[in-house]
């Protein structure tokens, strides 16, 4: 086999079935090898979008996403999404073409030190060697998926991709995190058994490790309400009586949840990474007066909070090991949990008037319970993350750690490619949609039926809001309105402009029976987000 074939075969064995990117002459052998191995190459319109589509497939399959880029500008176009994968714990194999080492000494066109560029934003970077191709790809997959997942880069010289290579298959059993043992585990078990006001805060590590069942068991056994980060929404179904929903960026939610956190006597943080949280969540508890048990996949080196017990281990196994034998009774008396749930519902009601909140509520009411949703960065994301009810993990995906714009559309496309018959809806601001509008062509070419909702207010609404809060003049945040419905039709999809709940309901009904993708441009007033979150 060629070295490229060895890489492709091992990726297929790891469950990868799609690769995304834009080819160049330097990656033609790689692309050929991927196709021969059974991995479909999807031609995207920009490498950054390609990376988010790859992430979208990971969320539905569990297999690492694959991004393919050619030398120089192609490789560097993916910088944003690769750092996003690093911060949002996304296993991704980034394959880039490069010129041969000897040629690089006498040829300069598009040539740069790509491994040096990628090293700070990946878990590891390799340059492929034909004799060790099977070792390099096995290492890359292990590093990408073990511990906290993340991206791994492989630079592939042109001649190496074509060179004969031997060796294939899994070379090493993957490392598995286990439940802790020792005095800290005993202290945690004793603290939970004696808790009067237990609270669970769950985050992204718990999603990655599949800890949803363990978290529900813990919540019900302890009588502990559950707060999640935005990426962890659905770890406990948000219809559950113990679910308090998501937190992260909303001052309105913080005004309800942070005082409640301060009342807890024992806090069980399960896979909680504060990379998603606003400054109000720096030191949200007092580890001196409250027992805080922090279970994470890696040690706390962020120092955004400190805990009484720091436990590194598998989230589900660790929680199960420290739960008391019998369910607790008499915790959180006087209906305190119900009062907080009611306060959260009152903070984010279903409104009777047209605006972003009514758009969100109407979409959720009109679509199936198993709908997959994606959210772009912007004001709408904060409101959506508080209002959108998730019944299972990854029901709503977004960029939370890096918080980058232009992610929602390709994330939705990646999910839809894996599950073409499932309802998938993407929520973008108009500026975010303009960043990735070319990927509507990808949706058409792939025959996808994704629904794209665009909040149209001709403004960078979140930045404009911050500008006004600081009493600064309006500068650099407003732009002309775009006819997104016409744009959708130009790319071969369906397009609707809506200015009322009734028009939105009709558009959603049509979208669910359409044989192509649909863009719904929800036109809202400027400053619609004032007081919303």
Image: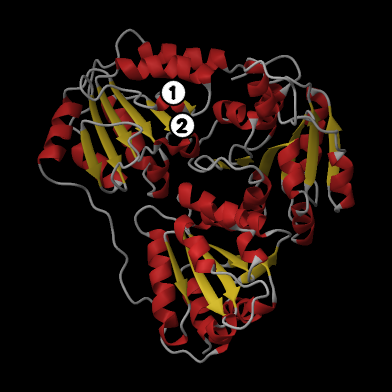
Q: Position of residue 81 (x, y in %)?
A: 58, 53
Q: Position of residue 69 (x, y in %)?
A: 63, 67
Q: Residue at x 68, y 38 (%)?
A: 427
Which type of secondary structure does the marked residue at label 1 adopt? Answer: helix
Find residue 441 and report its image quarter. Answer: bottom right
> Does residue 192 appear left or right of residue 373 in this picture?
left
Q: Position of residue 177 (x, y in %)?
A: 27, 54
Determine whether label 2 and label 1 are within 8 Å by CB. yes
Numbered mark located on residue 280 in the image: 1
Q: Residues within 10 Å of mark 1 (few under 14, many from 20)?
A: some
Numbered mark located on residue 277 in the image: 2
Q: Position of residue 110 (x, y in %)?
A: 66, 71
Q: Residue at x 64, y 28 (%)?
A: 379
Q: Nearer the viewer, residue 173 or 395?
A: 173
* Residue 287 showing in the rendered view: yes
Name the quadrant of the C terminus: top right
Q: Residues within 10 Å of mark 2 (few under 14, many from 20)?
A: some
């Amino acid at each position: 086999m060629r070295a490229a074939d060895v890489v492709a075969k091992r990726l297929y064995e790891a469950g990868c079935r799609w690769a995304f990117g834009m080819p160049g002459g330097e990656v033609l052998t790689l692309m050929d090898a991927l196709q021969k191995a059974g991995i479909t190459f999807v031609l995207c319109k920009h490498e950054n979008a390609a990376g988010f589509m790859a992430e979208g497939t990971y969320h539905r399959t569990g297999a690492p996403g694959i991004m393919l880029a050619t030398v120089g500008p192609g490789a560097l176009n993916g910088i944003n999404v690769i750092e996003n994968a690093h911060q949002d714990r996304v296993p991704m194999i980034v394959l880039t073409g490069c010129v041969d080492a000897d040629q690089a000494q006498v040829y300069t066109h598009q040539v740069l030190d790509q491994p040096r560029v990628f090293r700070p934003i990946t878990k590891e970077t390799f340059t492929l060697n034909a004799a060790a191709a099977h070792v390099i790809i096995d290492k890359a997959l292990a590093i990408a998926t073990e511990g906290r997942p993340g991206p791994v880069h492989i630079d592939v010289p042109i001649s190496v991709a074509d060179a004969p290579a031997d060796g294939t298959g899994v070379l090493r059993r993957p490392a598995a995190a286990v439940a802790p043992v020792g005095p800290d585990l005993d202290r945690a078990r004793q603290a939970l058994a004696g808790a009067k006001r237990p609270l669970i805060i769950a985050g992204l590590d718990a999603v990655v490790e599949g800890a949803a069942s363990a978290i529900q068991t813990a919540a019900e056994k302890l009588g502990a309400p559950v707060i999640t980060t935005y990426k962890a929404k659905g770890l406990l179904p948000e219809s559950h009586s113990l679910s308090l929903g998501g937190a992260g960026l909303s001052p309105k939610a913080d005004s309800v949840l942070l005082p409640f956190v301060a009342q807890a006597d024992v806090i069980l943080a399960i896979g909680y990474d504060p990379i998603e949280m606003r400054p109000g969540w720096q030191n949200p508890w007092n580890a001196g007066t409250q027992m805080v048990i922090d279970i994470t996949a890696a040690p706390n080196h962020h120092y955004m909070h400190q805990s009484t017990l720091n436990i590194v281990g598998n989230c589900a196994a660790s929680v199960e090991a420290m739960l008391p034998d019998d369910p607790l009774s008499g915790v959180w008396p006087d209906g305190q949990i119900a009062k907080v749930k009611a306060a959260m519902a009152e903070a984010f009601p279903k409104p009777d008037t047209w605006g972003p909140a009514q758009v969100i509520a109407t979409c959720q009411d009109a679509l199936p319970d198993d709908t997959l949703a994606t959210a772009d960065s912007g004001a709408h994301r904060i409101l959506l993350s508080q209002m959108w009810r998730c019944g299972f993990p990854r029901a709503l995906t977004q960029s939370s750690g890096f918080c980058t714009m232009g992610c929602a559309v390709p994330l939705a496309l990646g999910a839809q490619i894996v599950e073409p018959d499932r309802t998938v809806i993407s929520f973008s601001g108009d500026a975010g949609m303009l960043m990735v509008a070319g990927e509507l062509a990808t949706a058409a070419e792939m025959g996808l039926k994704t629904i794209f909702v665009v909040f149209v207010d001709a403004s960078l609404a979140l930045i404009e809001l911050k500008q006004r809060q600081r009493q600064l003049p309006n500068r650099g945040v407003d732009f002309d309105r775009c006819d997104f419905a016409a744009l959708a039709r130009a790319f071969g999809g369906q397009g609707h402009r809506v200015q009322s709940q009734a028009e939105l309901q009709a558009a959603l009904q049509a979208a669910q029976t359409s044989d192509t993708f649909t863009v719904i441009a929800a036109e809202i007033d400027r400053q619609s987000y004032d007081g919303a979150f």
